[in-house]
Amino acid sequence: MSNYALTVTSPSSRGIVAAIANYLADAGCNITDSAQFDDKETANFFMRVSFDTPDGPDLAAMAEGFAKTAEHFGMTFEFHDESEKMKVVIMVSRFGHCLNDILYRWRIGALPIDIVAVISNHMEYQKVVVNNDIPFHCIKVTKENKPEAEAQIMAVVEDTGAELIVLARYMQILSDQMCQKMSGRIINIHHSFLPSFKGANPYKQAFQRGVKLIGATSHYVTADLDEGPIIEQDTVRVTHAQSPDDYVSLGRDVESQVLARAIHAHIHRRVFLNGNKTVVFPASPGSYASERMG
């Protein structure tokens, strides 16, 4: 058996679920998992269906056959072969906790992605990247060369066929043009103190204010910097007895976990843009299973 997915976005309408289920049944498919959401505020409907078939479908033919149903309901849809790993470019600066976490999850198969390149504006992580047989590109970024540097970055993305860019604590602001070109295909991670504690040393600021919860937010990158549609968030509790350095260490842990969960949701096509928000469906059974334990 092979596993496939159909993702659908459409205006809310009666009969959509039945139409999708009937089409898949008539095509000889067995639905193994399904999630849907009808947003009353935006009048938008979202659905993700996992299915399998003994012989393996011709997805191009299925898409062609589904087009009439999609047109009737005004759907935007895609069929996906879940065995095909998404090509990903990771970008990092001098904080390596998220990069190392992604590499470990990738090695054991917990994040089934194809890392086609790592780009950095520093050399700190060249060895660890190359030791994993992943191409490493050091692209220095300054105020003077920023357009040229971004052109080099986009050349790597286009040459590798990357479908997703992950900013694993990449400490450079991307241009509006790049954000628009890669809309919905760049994921960022940062602490969850914004907008309260901006600038340098946000954890020290939080410590000085006696914060009791620290956390992280992963979101799609837009021209509005850290205000893109949120994919995943989490928190960890701290007490008066912990130091600013404890805050930083705990923050790094939660950042790594949140970013990994956001990537997992995106590569399994569980995230749907809904205006300035997202719809994120639960993971399908078995999608967290890794190929080996360590």
Image (cartoon, rainbow, N blue to C red):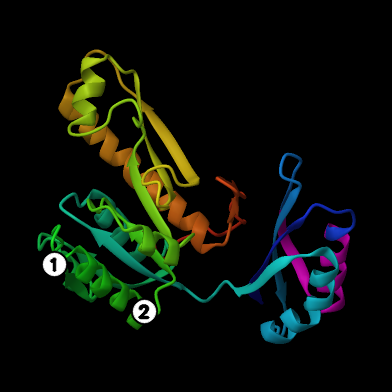
What's under tag 1, amino acid-wise?
A: Gln
Is 73 left, or right, of 250 in this rendering?
Answer: right
Indicate yes or no whether the magenta region holds residue 19: yes
Mark 2 sits on what residue? 158
Can you give x and y, in whole percent of width and height, for residue 10 in the image? 74, 59
Is 74 left, or right, of 151 in this rendering?
Answer: right
Is residue 239 visible to the viewer in this orientation of the structure?
yes
Q: Which residues are magenta?
A: 17-35
**Along the line of sight, the residue nearer the viewer: 277 or 6:** 277
* Residue at disc 1, secondary structure: helix
Work out whether 211 lies above or below 113: above
Work out whether 53 lies above or below 142: below
Can you give x and y, in whole percent of width and height, for residue 267 in the image? 50, 63
Q: How many marks?
A: 2
Q: Specify the quadrant of the image occupied by residue 176.
A: bottom left
**Along the line of sight, the residue nearer the viewer: 149 or 186:** 149
Indicate yes or no whether the magenta region holds residue 14: no
Mark 1 sits on what residue? 126
User: Nearer the observer, disc 1 or disc 2?
Assistant: 2
What's under tag 2, amino acid-wise?
A: Glu
Q: Residue at x 83, y 64 (%)?
A: 73
- Disc 1 and disc 2: Cα gap in Å? 21 Å
Judge the density around disc 1: few (<14), some (14-19), many (≥20) Cα neighbours within 10 Å.
some
**Along the line of sight, the residue nearer the viewer: 107 or 135:** 135
Is residue 131 visible to the viewer in this orientation of the structure?
no
Is 226 left, or right, of 122 in this rendering?
Answer: right
